[in-house]
Image: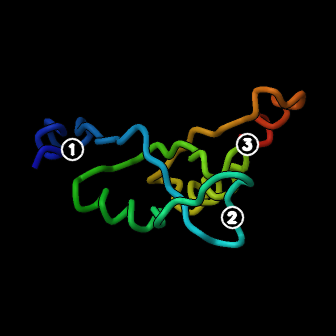
Amino acid sequence: GQAARLRGGSGASQMSVVDSAVHVWKADPAYPFAEGVSPPAKDATPEELLAMMDKNGVDKTVIVQPICYKWDNSFVLDTIKKWPDRFAAVARVDPEDLNGVQRIEELT
């Protein structure tokens, strides 16, 4: 498929296929959606994403914090901790938070 053509080689020189902007979420009381946000109609779980990645030859994905969690990055952080070899993340930090720099440091 397309992913195999993008790899362009084998062995140590093989190119990785990385999807650079995907959102994941799920309705779970451990990860409540932000107040005032309409919950998504259905879940988009990391497990579903992994299955799609494997099916399509994607090695890694960068998960972008979805708006449904607003500034709470817990779900995305737990996801990348569970599958560190498959996922990296982009977090959301409230630009009006006076402790924004501290929040960023807490995420790393």
Q: x%, y% of residue 27?
A: 59, 69
Disc 2 from disc 1: Cα separation: 40 Å
Disc 3 from disc 2: Cα separation: 16 Å
Disc 3 from disc 1: Cα separation: 34 Å
User: Residue at point 64% right, 58% down?
Assistant: 75
Circle nearer the viewer, 3 or 1: 3
Residue type at mark 1: give it: Gly
Secondary structure state at the residue bearing disc 2: loop
Tag count in the figure?
Answer: 3
Q: x%, y% of residue 89?
A: 55, 43
Left or right: 63, with 93 as reference point:
left
Is 75 rendered above or below residue 66?
A: below
User: Residue at point 46% right, 43% down?
Assistant: 62
Left or right: 91, with 64 as reference point:
right
Q: Quadrant of the C terminus?
A: top right
Which numbered disc flags the more N-terminal residue, 2 or 1? 1
Q: Which residue is mark 3?
A: 107
Q: x%, y% of residue 36?
A: 71, 52
Q: x%, y% of residue 68?
A: 61, 51
Secondary structure state at the residue bearing disc 1: helix
Q: Which mark is residue 31?
A: 2
Secondary structure state at the residue bearing disc 3: helix
Circle nearer the viewer, 3 or 2: 2
